[in-house]
Image (spheres, helix red, strand yellow):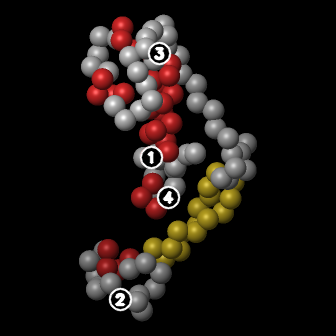
Amino acid sequence: SPPLEADVMNVHYQKYYNGESAPVDYLPTNPIMLLTVGSEVTFQTHFAIPQNKQLKLWTGDFEKLIKDTDLTADSNLLDFINTWLKKALSEHGIGAKTAVGYGYFQ
């Protein structure tokens, strides 16, 4: 089991978000306790592909997908998946609460 850490998300202006009040500082906060996976945990992701072909042999329009990456037409499908998986997890995150910093990978 990965190590879990306690965290608190403190919702401000709950009555405002419910349409009951203006967003004023004297409204009570609503702390929500939650468990998170420790930041030092290492994840492994596995995927399978039938053949590790070069991108230039792919029938799709890969030129748009390799723009702004280190990939070329001679890169293979495994490199393509690895690049985009890392990009998605580091730039967009995964799961809930990414807007407040959860779910991003390094």
* In this view, the mark in front (4 or 3): 3
- For badge 2, the amino acid type reads Val
Secondary structure of the residue carrying tag 3 is: loop
The answer to the question of whether label 1 and label 2 lie on touching residues, with beta carbons closer than 8 A, is no
The answer to the question of whether label 4 and label 3 lie on touching residues, with beta carbons closer than 8 A, is no
- Residue pointed to by mark 4: 101
* Quadrant position of the C terminus in the picture: top right
- For badge 3, the amino acid type reads Asn
Residue name at image x 52 percent, y 50 percent: 103
Q: Quadrant of residue 16?
A: bottom left
- Residue pointed to by mark 2: 24
Spatial separation of the CA atoms under disc 4 and disc 2: 25 Å
Q: Tell me if mark 2 has few (under 14), some (14-19) or many (20+) residues whose alpha carbon lies within 10 angstroms of its own.
A: few
Q: Is residue 18 visible?
A: yes
- Residue pointed to by mark 1: 91
Q: Is residue 50 visible?
A: no
Q: Quadrant of residue 17?
A: bottom left
Residue name at image x 53 percent, y 68 percent: 9
* In this view, the mark in front (3 or 1): 3
